[in-house]
Image (cartoon, coloured by chain):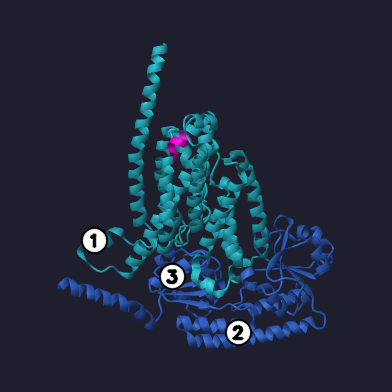
Chain colours: A cyan, B blue
Amino acid sequence: MTVADNLTIPIQREDRRVKARRAHIWLAALLAVTAILSLATGPTGTSLWGALGKLITGEELTTMERVVLWDIRLPRLILGMVIGASLAVSGAVMQGLFRNPLADPGLVGVGAGAGLGAIVAIVLGALLPIWLRDIVGNYLVSFSAFFGGWLSTIILYRVSTRRGQTSVATMLLAGIALGALAGAVSGILVYMADDQQLRDLTFWGMGSLAGATWAKVIVAAPLIGIAVVASFFLGQGLNGLALGEATAAHLGISVQRLKSAAIMIVAGATGAAVAVSGGIGFIGIVVPHLLRLATGPDHDTLLPNAALLGATLLLGADIISRLIIAPAELPIGIVTAVLGAPVFLWILLRRRGLVEF
Amino acid sequence: MRMHMKAAALAAFTAVVPSFVQAEETQGIVSIGGSITEIIYALGKGDQLIARDTTSSFPAEANDLPDVGYMRALSPEGVLSVSPGLIVSEDGAGPPETIDVLKAADIPLVMITDEFSRAGIVTKIRAVGEAVGATNEAEALAVDVDAQLQSAEETATARAGDTPKRVLFILSTQGGRIMASGRNTAADSIISMAGAVNAITEFEGYKQLSDEAISVAAPDVILMMDRGGDHGADNSELLSMPAIVTTPAAETESVVRMNGLYMIGFGPRTADAILELSAALYGE
């Protein structure tokens, strides 16, 4: 009996690893299909295949084809992919770092700070000197949101770090306080805002990829991409951390370096993602949970899989958001929440044995 | 070589299309802004409209057109999908990223300044007329509307006499919090055009008011938009709110409700709106 137990454990572990590896391939294939679908579908009905055919035969593209495929759908595809990946990976890293299944990037203050940054830009942007407005132009809100997210993470990190040790519990509590403060300042600005600014704020909060441009791709995509790839190297550390900080340290993991790296990566990835797309919820929670259920909690495979599935889901949500009420567009944050919330609920209930499907 | 010629011909053709469309009768107009749509219909160009924004709800035919969404959150591919030949919009359509894409697609876009006054409406009508190629019709309509507005304002002033009423415009009463109009809003303008006085002059725009501030403002009449949802508190409920119960308006049960676009849209129907509002305030 004992012998049998000893035998089954390694076999089971191996099995899960194989499953997770296979999931890499499946998810990559799924992402590729969704990406092509995202380039091929849209309310204009411009054909990707027609345009590709013309490229091969050397024919000139029509203005419509050039604008729709090159200026609208392609930057949207790239941003959707990196943002989806970064939201899911950030969620997985935070859940590992805080050892809490409900953790999301909001816990390191990025969300509140970025939100405040965006509100400041929308409401007070008109007060800026003209020369500065000329330089930052349309991207003021994005810059301000990124700066706000980054600043609040730095503050939070400083507050919760004593003698070179970051206390995750302090960070959680300080994050709540900082969030409340940011919310209050946002409230004051909302009070000062005029009608149009209020509408802008509402739409910003619901998130959208409709404003994707090449300029945003060039500025944000490399930053987010690097952060996502860098997070893959946190896998072993986060696995160790699951056993507790002390045990992780005994395993030879530099816990403090792991924490600061995780926080920086999440702040960079989420800050940039939120800055270009506004608030998009639920990807960061649903994706890691789904994957843990399907392929186990090993962060080495979980993080790349989360990146792939997050990218796929956000692209899918974006396709829905642009088609469902065409020619208008449903903010993508609404789509991810409407799809994500029931799935999340289903995961919870299934786990507790309350539903059996 | 043949391929080259074909490409050149195609390029020439695509380059010619936009100007060709403009020189001919303008086809396929997308109208952004409730009053812009009203004006386009009033100019007899309604049959050329192919899409509208969310705020365009009058005349009723407008509701049959595809809706491209809220004017400040337009989707680039969504707007392109209706194949617009021309976009006529109230000032402030966006986001800027979408506008850039529309420019890249060579779609002419005319922004019309919105100003809440008689002169503003007349200017708006002329500008829309010029944009849609109906300059003569617009001129006639502008003169007509200008005269109507003048006479409506005179009538309203005469009805008000020496005792203009104090009017409080309430945007919403959601959760017992009252959002009211201060200075420099469309509501503020229509109140003064109808021969009344805005009860709130301490701030600009629409803001939440404290209960006591409303008491102090002492409005004689409460003006609201007539639609469902959070604006839908019925009169008895509204007048028994602590903020309002102490006001002269509650005493006389004076609440006026009018359709939002009609009342504060500042389009061709504004003269009628002024007359209707002033009649509601002061009687015929």
Give amino acid for label 2. Answer: Val
Q: Mark 3: which secondary structure?
A: helix
| Front residue of A87 and A160 | A160
Give amino acid for label 1. Answer: Gly
Q: What residue range appears in magenta?
A: A234-239
Q: Which corner quadrant of the image does residue A148 belong to?
A: bottom right
| Front residue of A85 and B53 | A85
Q: Residue at x 48, y 54 (%)?
A: A273
Please give the residue where the numbered disc 3 appears in the rendered image: B100
Q: Quadrant of the N terminus of chain B?
A: bottom left
The mark found on residue A53 in the picture is 1
Please give the residue where the numbered disc 2 appears in the rendered image: B145
* Crowd rating for badge 1 (residues with CA inside 10 Å; few <14, some 14–19, many 20+): few
Cα separation, mark 2 vs mark 1, equals 55 Å
Q: Mark 1: which secondary structure?
A: helix
Q: Which corner quadrant of the image does residue B149 belong to?
A: bottom right
- The label nearer to you, 1 versus 3, is 3
* Crowd rating for badge 3 (residues with CA inside 10 Å; few <14, some 14–19, many 20+): some
Chain bearing mark 2: B
Q: Residue at x 60, y 82 (%)?
A: B120
- The label nearer to you, 2 versus 1, is 1
Whether pointer 3 and pointer 2 mark residues with C-beta atoms closer than 8 Å, the reply is no
* Mark before the other along the chain sequence, 3 or 2: 3
Give amino acid for label 3. Answer: Asp
Q: Are marks 1 and 3 on the same chain?
A: no
Image x and y of residue B82, in percent: 41, 67
Chain bearing mark 3: B
Q: Residue furthest front?
A: A163
Image x and y of residue A45, in percent: 35, 61
